[in-house]
Amino acid sequence: MDTADHQLEERRLARAISARMQAESLLEQKSLQLYEQAQEREQAVLALRESEERYRLLVELSPDAILIEIDGFIVFANAAAQTLFFATRPEDLFGRSLVSLMAPASRTALAHILQQNESSPAVEDQAVRLDDTLVDVAVTRIAFIYRGEPAIQMIARDISDRKRLEKQLLYQATHDTLTGLANRNLMRERLNDAIVYASRYDQAVWVLFLDLDRFKFFNDSLGHKAGDMLLKEIAARLRAGTRETDTVARLGGDEFVVILPERTREVLAVAALQRLMDAIARPMHLDGKEISVTCSVGLAIYPTDGDAPDTLLEHADIAMYRAKDGGRNNFQFFTADMHEEVRERILIEDALRTALERDEFFLHYQPQVRADTHQIVGIETLIRWRHPELGIVAPNRFISIAEETGLIVPIGAWVLRTACLQNKAWQSNGLGQLRMAVNLSARQFAHADFVQSVADILAETGLEPHCLELELTESLIMSDVDHAIEKLHALKALGIKLSIDDFGTGYSSLSYLKRFPIDVLKIDQAFVRDIAVDPDDAAIVLSIISLAHNLNLRVIAEGVETREQVDYLRAHGCDEMQGYLFSPPVTREEFEQILASERRRDSWHADTSAGTAAN
Amino acid sequence: MVIKHGSDMKGIVFRELVDMIEERFSPAIADKIISASSLATNGAYTSVGTYDHKEIVELVGHLSTTTGIPVPDLQRTFGEHLLNRFALLYPAHFRGQKSTFAFLAILDNKIHVEVKKLYPDAELPVFEHDLADPCKMVFVYRSKRPFADLAEGLIRGCIKHFNEDITLSRQDLPADEGAHTRFILIKN
């Protein structure tokens, strides 16, 4: 081999080596690249495996039921799903479809959703367990790829406890706890619905406001437990006596409302009402006692008596009170004039609340005279009210309202104090030592501090006790005789006089009369009026006078208007008289004039007598 | 080894060129033209590497000078040689192809796709074909490199490989750089 050849071979060899080194370097580079890629892939696989493991744990330990469905077949269910659906093993759920696990009612809609193969937001639904019972669930469906295939994952949470609680809360919010009847809220809602329906179909709705008669008495005498049992029994009877579509509600206490919708024929509605009242009146056994309860019912009818729930209820309520006034176990339809009365009542009640502070009351005075000499010996005070807008409001329009609202207590105290002050003033002015008679109301008398307040007023005004006479009515005393007698003695101990007003009209037993520490009987003007023409009235008056005298009581006849009445009363021993014949109730000024003129007459008489005597 | 800028052609082509020169001419001529050229690798090529195509241009230029054979003829000859080698080295690409038309038709969107997968940085020429009728194929070659003659050689090699009677004509189209050539193949 020559040198040139040798050199050529060397260069070829060098190129071959260089090429091999390049190739090795490139291969190394490539294999490093492959290694790095493999590392990355391994990391990714690891991360994927971790994420899968996290998912698996999450799914298996989830308190929510999780099921996976592919092609309409469940292929996975977790432990919570097993529990929720009452399966023995999760595998028991495999092979079924998600749709088959939901309530039949929602299957069609669900099948449609699943067909879209889309995720759906959480909805509340009902699932069917393997034992065919239903359970309330909140369901979320997620479309995803599971093991390479399109799948649906369903997450179901048992919300039956919450649903039960919701139902319970709703029930409690709409029902009376004691009787299970609808409460006021639900009743108003039902009434509203009934009105809407009736207005569309031109029908009537009857609203019955029902109040048990003397429930307070039963409750007090039998005990609250028995009272509750009674209410439950009444509720059951009302429920039994009405249709499914009627509403029976308890508003509280012993007040019930019954709504009879879709009633067009009055005869039938009244018959239904009568049946209800009869059912209530049927005797019942409570704690081994047989008792009978009646009720009073007021009725208002849509659309005649109002078209709003509140109006109808108010009107039925008004009618109920009227039914009560008219005697128990009674029902009363609402009429427009009742509403007028109520309106006036509300007007007066409102005005009454501010009458004292606005100084709208004043007193009238009527003289009481001796039957023989006609000399003034006493004064009856009578309250008067002048309202700036209503004008003079007659006592019969406001006294009973004052009594019911309790306003009579401060008003009565004002009357008593004013009368005492006036009498004291007249005495100081030398107009004589007269008895001042003041009427008492039941509420006032029943007030615990009453005796003390009388003592305080006497002390405050300085009036001597024997110059004050308190007039009580029979019914006032008779409502709680023992307590009343105790109080009367306490008043008597103060030194004041006591009289019984309107005697003969009440229910007082004569046997009680002698136990009352009273001084005077007042004969009601109803007997006095016809004394001269009606022998019966004359006989009553006579017996009252003789009874009073036997008990050492004085007798005053009220409402004396004629000379004949005066003659008769005087002839039969009546001690004192009061009436228009002598003087109507008059103002302070007028009364002062009467007293003044009497004093002049007396002094004239006295002068004349003196003169005669002198003669 | 660092792949330098301009390394745009697969090493196999360079290897095959050197091999062909050594075979057809002689190792001495190959060594001579390598030594005469200014090559980044001094003519050491590995088939897994990538090199600047200008080195081929230079090598072929020196070969032409040395042998007196025009460059286009050398390129065509190299193309035919290259196709035979490809058929030998990568039989998978030829398997299943029964004709020149079929092979050329899948060249761009099948074989080059596979090549790209293996060598993401390879810069490959673009071929477009239009089979106007079953007997006539229009094949347009576009490359940044001035290898239209090489392409012609490859096509000729292909026709020989499938042992078909096809008349090849070519039409050079204007190009800013490299080559843009339309080949027309008509079956006889």
Image (spheres, rainbow, N blue to C red):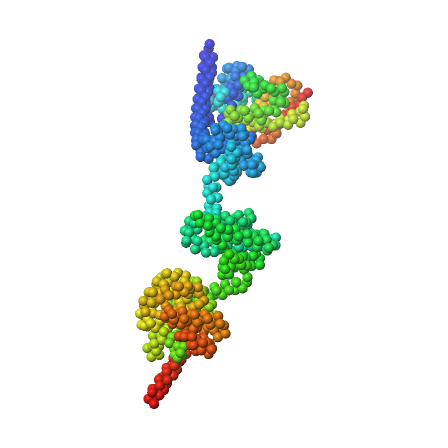
As drawn, is A328 to the left or to the right of A377? right
Judge whether A514 appears above or below A70 on screen. below
Numbered disc total: 0
Q: Nearer the viewer, residue A323 or A39?
A: A323
Towards the viewer: B118 or A198: A198
Instruction: Please provide percent x and percent y for residue A564.
Output: 47, 78
Residue B2 appears in the rendering: no
Residue found at x 45% / y 25%: A38
**In front of the other: A437 or A337:** A437
Q: How far from the left and from the top, in percent, is residue B136?
A: 66, 24
Seen at 36% across and 87% down, the residue is: A608
Residue A456 against residue B140 in the figure, above or below: below
Q: Position of residue A580 (x, y in %)?
A: 45, 76
Tell me which corner region of the image, top left, top right, bottom left or bottom right, holds residue A512.
bottom left
Q: Which residue does the image show at 64% across and 27% down from the upper left?
A: B130
Examine the rendered structure and indicate whether residue A517 appears above or below residue A72.
below
Rendered residue at 41%/66% (across/down):
A473
Instruction: Decide which of A380, A256 is in the foreground and name it.
Output: A380
Q: Does residue A408 appear to the left or right of B125 in the view shown?
A: left
Which residue ends up furthest to the top in the rendered image?
Answer: A1
Q: Is residue A127 left or right of residue A357?
A: right
Residue A49 at x, y = what percent? 44, 28
Task: Tell me the quarter of the picture where residue B124 sits.
Answer: top right
- Quadrant location, the C terminus of chain A: bottom left
One can see residue A541 in this view: yes
